[in-house]
Image (tube, rainbow, N blue to C red):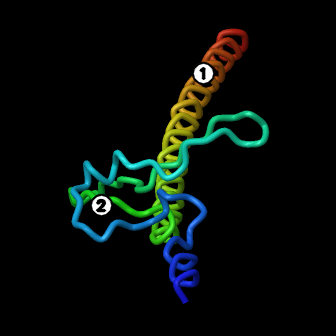
Amino acid sequence: MVGHAIATKHLTANPGDIIVKETQSVEEKAKQVAVDKYDITGSHITVPTYFVFKYPNGETKALHHVRDAKEISNLIRQMRLEEEDIAMEETHGSHINGLIVVLGVFSLALLLMTGALLVGVF
């Protein structure tokens, strides 16, 4: 039985995956690192234990990379959609400005051609 208790004490591959039961501030959580290793390709990988998010209402939360993975994914997805919306607004705004310039140039050219025809006819 003693061996079984030791084997189930740490059920994670990384010590940083363990959620500490003591209360910690967001700043303390932000400093924790779950993984700090080199992978098989030689790339250095660092994974924070907690991802810190600041919400639009001013609230700051430290989300655990395992326990809160779904919420982290949702927040990242939401941020990407907001970035895409901003990029779309900027793109459409520049297209409209470009269209106004093209229409202005076209109108000016049409006016000059009409003026030349009128001068030639009379």
Within 10 Å of the Cα at label 2, are there few (<14), some (14-19), or many (20+) other Cα atoms?
some
Upstream in the sequence, badge 1 or badge 2? 2
The quarter of the image holding the N terminus is bottom right
Residue 65: x, y in percent? 48, 61
Within 10 Å of the Cα at label 1, are there few (<14), some (14-19), or many (20+) other Cα atoms?
few
| SS assignment at label 1 | helix
Residue 33: x, y in percent? 45, 48
The quarter of the image holding the C terminus is top right
> Disc count in the image?
2
Residue 106: x, y in percent? 64, 25
Residue holding disc 2: 61
Q: From the viewer's perspective, is residue 59 above or below residue 118?
A: below
Residue 88: x, y in percent? 55, 47
Identity of the residue drawn at 54% across and 49% down:
35
Residue holding disc 1: 105
Q: Nearer the viewer, residue 100 or 119?
A: 100
Identity of the residue drawn at 25% across and 67% down:
22
